[in-house]
Image (cartoon, helix red, strand yellow):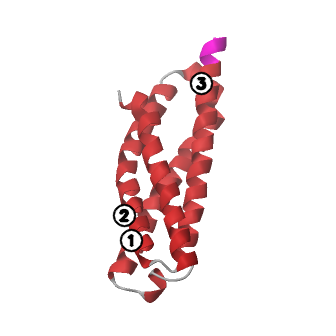
Amino acid sequence: MMAELHPFFVHFPIALILVASGFDLFAVLWKHAASIKVALILQVIAAVSSILVALSGNQAELSVTGEPSLTQYVDEALQTHVTFGNASIWIMVLFVLGRSIAILEKRPWAQEGWIFPGISFSLAILIMVTGLYGGALSREILQYYITH
């Protein structure tokens, strides 16, 4: 059941991270401190919701690896998506923890400059690439079922 929900769960944190990076950019360009808080809140929600993404993704991976002929057909796309997905989730969680601590400790560099917005934007790109690999994997799985 969780495996089928993976495509549904995954879009929520992706959207949150993309919007959060927009708030980060806005905060830096227009010196808007409230936008930093909004970005952090969105990133925290995305990091927490990524737990569902990871659980459902692991179930989806098990359903694919449970069929050896399918696994052979989509192995490269599957491994690439899993690697990028795991990296994205870990980087997001570590980023949110680090940023939260820096902001709570009122570090001046945490609320000014390009450090966190740069990481936020890089994370958004990483997550988009992961999603592209997920889409390619879905198309390969569909192609397998059409041709076999």
Instruction: Say which amino acid is labelled 1.
Output: Lys
- Mark 3 sits on what residue? 141
Please provide percent x and percent y for residue 35: 44, 71
Instruction: Say which amino acid is labelled 2.
Output: Ile
Mark-to-mark CA distance, 3 and 2: 35 Å
Q: Residues within 10 Å of mark 2 (few under 14, many from 20)?
A: some
The numbered dot on residue 143 is none
**Can I make out residue 126 in this image?**
yes
Element on which disc 2 rests: helix
The image quadrant of residue 62 is top left
Residue at 58% x, 76% y is 29
Mark-to-mark CA distance, 3 and 1: 40 Å
Element on which disc 1 rests: helix
| Side of 9 relative to 22 (left or right) | left
Q: Main SS of the magenta segment?
A: helix
Toward the bottom, the furthest residue is 108
Please provide percent x and percent y for residue 57: 44, 38
- Mark 1 sits on what residue? 37
> Which comes sooner in the sequence, label 3 or label 2?
2
Q: Is residue 70 above or below residue 100?
A: above
* Residue extent of the magenta highlight: 144-148
Mark-to-mark CA distance, 1 and 2: 6 Å
- Mark 2 sits on what residue? 41
Which quadrant holds the N terminus? Answer: top left
**Can I make out residue 58 in this image?**
no
> Which comes sooner in the sequence, label 3 or label 1?
1
Residue at 63% x, 13% y is 146
Marks counted in the figure total 3
